[in-house]
Image: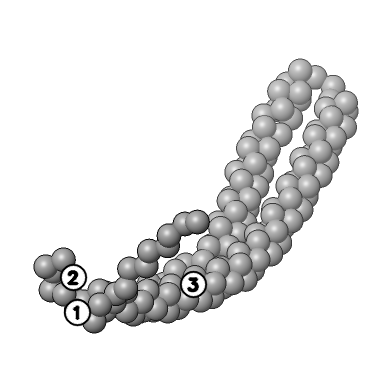
């Protein structure tokens, strides 16, 4: 039916005029492949650890940021209440005036007080925002400093 030819490998370490053994080369590649696989596993573990650390860090930063945002929002609500109360008090005082000069004086006084209050409120909001930014970024900065100091 069909003739099957088999080529037998000779014990001659030189094939085709080359001085390389026929089967020694794959062994060398196997050693290199094993080393590379080991290194890849080690690097994978390092990346996995770093990823877990970053996840914990980001959760912590998020919690700090959420608390800070809530503090900021509470302060904005407090400021809004204060400003509304001030406006209502101004309207009430304005209704009790009897002359144009009293209206002008009352308006000037209210404008000055309102400007001073707004300036103070903006400072408070700025301080809260600065505190939130600092507290949120602190764990991240520490983590990066630690990562940069760790030899790989």
For residue 81, side relative to residue 24 (left or right): right
In the rendered view, does 4 fall on the left or right side of 133?
left
Which residue is at a point 53% across and 63% down the rendered structure image? 137
- Mark 1 nearby-residue class (10 Å; few <14, some 14–19, many ≥20): few
The numbered mark, 3 or 2, whose residue comes first in the sequence reads: 2
The answer to which of 122 and 152 lies nearer the viewer is: 152
Return the residue at label 1: 12
**Residue at image location 32% in from the left, 79% down from the top:** 27
Residue 17, position as x, y percentages in the image: 11, 68
Say whether residue 29 is visible.
Answer: no
Q: Residues within 10 Å of mark 2 (few under 14, many from 20)?
A: few
- In the picture as drawn, the residue positioned furthest to the front comes out as 1
Q: Position of residue 141 (x, y in %)?
A: 47, 67
Mark 2–mark 1 distance (CA, rounded to whole Å): 7 Å
* Residue 61's disc number: none
Residue that appears at 59% across and 72% down: 52
Judging by the rendered image, the residue that carries numbered circle 3 is: 44
Secondary structure under the numbered disc 1 in the rendered image: loop
Count of marks placed on residues: 3
């Amino acid at each position: 039916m069909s003739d099957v030819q088999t080529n037998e490998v000779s014990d001659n370490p030189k094939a085709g005029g080359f001085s390389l053994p026929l089967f020694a080369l794959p062994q060398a590649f196997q050693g290199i492949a094993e080393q590379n696989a080991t290194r890849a596993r080690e690097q994978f573990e390092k990346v996995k650890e770093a990823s877990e650390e970053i996840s914990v860090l980001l959760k912590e930063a998020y919690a700090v940021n959420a608390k800070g945002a809530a503090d900021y929002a509470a302060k904005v609500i407090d400021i809004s209440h204060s400003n509304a109360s001030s406006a209502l008090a101004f309207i009430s005082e304005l209704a009790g005036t009897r002359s144009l000069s009293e209206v002008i004086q009352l308006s000037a006084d209210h404008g000055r007080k309102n400007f001073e209050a707004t300036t103070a409120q903006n400072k408070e909001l700025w301080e809260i925002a600065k505190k939130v930014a600092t507290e949120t970024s602190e764990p991240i900065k520490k983590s990066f400093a630690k990562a940069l100091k760790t030899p790989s």
